[in-house]
Amino acid sequence: MKKLERDFYLRDTLVVAKELLGKQLVHEAQDFRIVCRIVETEAYVGPEDKGSHSYGGRRTNRNEVMYHIGGTSYVYLIYGMYYCFNVVTEQADKPAAVLVRAVDPVESVGHMSQLRYGMEFPSLSSKQKLGLCNGPGKLCIAMGIGKAENGLDLCGSKLYIRDAQNEPFSIKSTPRINIDYAGEYAGKPWRFYIEGNKYVSKI
DNA sequence: ACGGGGATGGGCT
DNA sequence: GCCCATCCCCGTA
C-alpha cells in the first residue's frame, strides 16, 4: 500500500488514466479519513484536445493548476453546484489531467454517507447506496473534496493515491462523457473503467 | 425505461 | 448572456 510517487504522474496521460484504476484515493482531513478505490477515469491529454480545459493553450485562474507538475490535484466547480476531481499529469507546463469519474468505498463508508446524504449508511435505500460515489460530482461530495482541495500536492499527506492489492480486472474504454462540443476528439476512447464494477457511472 | 428540464455560479466572448 | 468534464426530479410509457 505504497503512496504513489512523483514519477507515476509524470508519464503519458493515457497510461496514467489506465493505471489509476484499482488504486486507492485517500483523503486525510482533520476529523475524518476516507479511502476509496478508483474504478473509472477519463484522460484529457493536452492543448490539442478539444475536450480539455487547456485546449489551445488556454490558461486562466480556473485551470492554472493544470500547468503545474504531474501529481497535483485539479478541482473545479461545474454547473454551479458540483465539483470534479482531477489528477494533473506529465511535466510542468504540459497542461494534461485525468478526471476521476467513479470510486468504490473502502474505508469510512459511514462518513461518506453522512457527507452525501446526511444519513447513516445502513438506513440508505439500495439505490442511494449505489449512488453514493458513482459519478464525478457525487464522489467529491462523498469524499469531502471541494475547492479547498484544489492545487494540493498528491505526493503530500492530505490527499494522495496509493497502491492496492487487487483481484485481476479488465479495463474497458469508451468515448468520454458529455463532451459533444469536442469535434473529432469527442469520439476518442479515452474513458476507462473496471469492467463489471457496480460503481461505474454508465456502461 | 427513458427523456426533458431546473438548479446554480464561474468562466469566457 | 451563453456555455458547462453534473445530478436529480418529474413527466410520459
Image (cartoon, coloured by chain):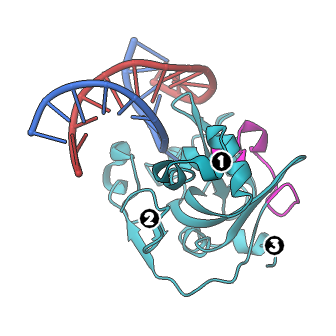
Chain colours: A cyan, B red, C blue
Does the magenta run of residues contain A143? yes
Q: Label 2 neighbourhood size at 10 Å, few (<14), some (14-19), many (20+)?
A: many
According to the picture, the residue beneath numbered tag 1 turns out to be A113
According to the picture, the residue beneath numbered tag 3 turns out to be A3
The segment highlighted magenta reads A141-159
Location of residue A114 (image quadrant)? top right
Looking at the picture, do discs 2 and 1 lie on one chain? yes
Q: Earlier in the sequence, mark 2 or mark 1?
A: 1
**Helix, strand or loop at mark 1:** helix
Assign the N terminus of chain A to one quadrant of the image: bottom right
In the rendered structure, the residue with mark 1 lies on which chain? A
- Of A32 and A152, nearer the camera is A32
Query: Of the residues shown, which amino acid type is indicated by label 3?
Result: Lys
Front of the two marks 3 and 2: 3
Furthest residue in direction front, as rendered: A123
Q: Label 3 neighbourhood size at 10 Å, few (<14), some (14-19), many (20+)?
A: some
Does the magenta run of residues contain A71? no
Q: Residue at x 75, y 55 (%)?
A: A72
Where is residue A121 drawn, in percent x and y? 64, 51
**Helix, strand or loop at mark 3:** loop
According to the picture, the residue beneath numbered tag 2 turns out to be A190
Front of the two marks 2 and 1: 1
